[in-house]
Image (cartoon, helix red, strand yellow):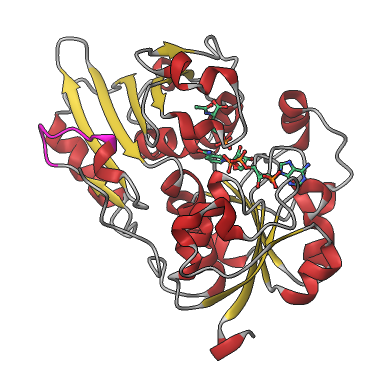
Amino acid sequence: MGELGRVPVGIVGASGYGGVQLVRLLKEHPGVELVYLGGESSAGKPFSDLYPHLGHCVDLNIEPLDLDTIASRCKVVFLSLPNGLAYQMAPALVAKGCKVLDLSADYRFFDLETYQSWYGGDRADREIAATAAYGLPELYRDRIAEASLIGCAGCYPTASLLALSPLLKQGLILSETAIIDAKSGTSGGGRQAKTNLLLAEADNSLGPYGVGGRHRHTPEIEQVCSDLAGHEVRVQFTPHLIPMVRGILATVYATLRDPGLVREDLLTIYKAFYRSSPFVKMLPGGTYPQTKWACGTNLCYIGIEVDPRTDRVIVMSAIDNLVKGQAGQALQCLNLMMGWEETLGLPTMGFYP
Ligand SMILES: NC(=O)C1=CN([C@@H]2O[C@H](COP(=O)(O)OP(=O)(O)OC[C@H]3O[C@@H](n4cnc5c(N)ncnc54)[C@H](OP(=O)(O)O)[C@@H]3O)[C@@H](O)[C@H]2O)C=CC1
Ligand SMILES: CC(=O)N[C@@H](CCC(=O)OP(=O)(O)O)C(=O)O
């Protein structure tokens, strides 16, 4: 244990957007002590050079990656790296007794064939990958609590799955009719320079990408939908880049099996489904979520509507992609793994306006 009995934790990829959110959250968490920050091009720099607004409370340098050093100092390691790197590190860290929470896609897939067909790579970590839990606590709370390795859910999948799950789990929709229209802010693309994320490209512009099942979050969403429904599910998922920094809004459309269901019926069903999920906030009938409400929080706001003319249900969910969609979700998973209160150290009030 670290100072004052706190659990010593490290962040690999601390210089990125996920990394800095983790630093912010972990510094205020009563159960942990932040003892290691790792990076690649930023190694050797004081963290406060990169993020001066946290200089008053973080006095650590970014260090080069050395697994022995990390394992000797940390009981818990967050990996916040580009896809394809975590699976080269996690097996050794778990073998040395660390709990590992990976924010990338490396441990999100129930079968490695699906991972490899979308992300490539040559996986020699089959045994350890099979022990990983999918890091979406609202759906896999018990498995997360028992695991040493977590593949934290993706940002679009988090917003999409929290909106869709009650419908699929209870067989309320014709699953093949499910359409997910989702919009993300530019921080979803990370801190690395990318042309399409330049202000001049993204500002005043809203556009789809990965259309026609071509985005790598489609298989991630489908595997969980299939798991919940108990049969193979295909969804139509279309992401959009929207000119804002933080937030995801997912609007899900599907045809109801029972056209007699009204909005209030569905609200009752959703409230029951999420009764033990403190971060899911069901909105009253006629109120629809806005990304700004979730900004800086680990909350997911969900609104529901039914169109009796088309027999479709419309479910809208809003999250902060960097918190509930990434760093906050990882910390929520850690709380479960450690047997702490699920909400410990996680913000529930936003930056609004
Ligand atoms: N942004 C988002 O909304 C979400 C992101 N994710 C996932 O989380 C992970 C991190 O994303 P994000 O924080 O946005 O990414 P960033 O691009 O902001 O940060 C990436 C981090 O990885 C480090 N890094 C890059 N290459 C290497 C390498 N070869 N070896 C070691 N470290 C390296 C960088 O270090 P340095 O700067 O020192 O080079 C940096 O700290 C990704 O897998 C992403 O898909 C998940 C959910 C949401
Ligand atoms: C706006 C933007 O570029 N978003 C990213 C998704 C965010 C992300 O990093 O994906 P994970 O949740 O799988 O880690 C994209 O579409 O690739």
Image location of residue 142, percent across then percent down: 52, 62
Q: Does residue 146 appear in this view?
A: yes
Which of 186 and 345 lies nearest the eye of the viewer? Answer: 186
Q: Is residue 286 magenta?
A: yes
Which of 200 and 344 lies nearest the eye of the viewer? Answer: 200
Q: Main secondary structure of the magenta part?
A: loop
Image location of residue 217, percent across then percent down: 57, 28
Q: Is residue 322 magenta?
A: no
Name the residue located 50 percent from the left edge and 49 percent from the top edge. 136
Name the residue located 24 percent from the left edge and 43 percent from the top edge. 293
Q: Is residue 248 left or right of residue 59?
A: left
Q: Quadrant of the C terminus?
A: top left
In the rendered image of this protein, does residue 276 appear above or below residue 81? below
Q: Which residues are magenta?
A: 284-291
Q: Does residue 229 appear in this view?
A: no
Tally of marks: 0
Q: Quadrant of the N terminus?
A: bottom right
Which of 320 and 118 lies nearest the eye of the viewer? Answer: 320
Ligand 1 positioned in quadrant: top right
In the rendered image of this protein, does residue 79 appear above or below residue 319? below
Q: Residue furthest bottom?
A: 4
Q: Is residue 35 left or right of residue 20?
A: right
Image location of residue 297, percent across then percent down: 34, 52
Q: Quadrant of residue 267?
A: top left
Q: Is residue 83 left or right of residue 320?
A: right
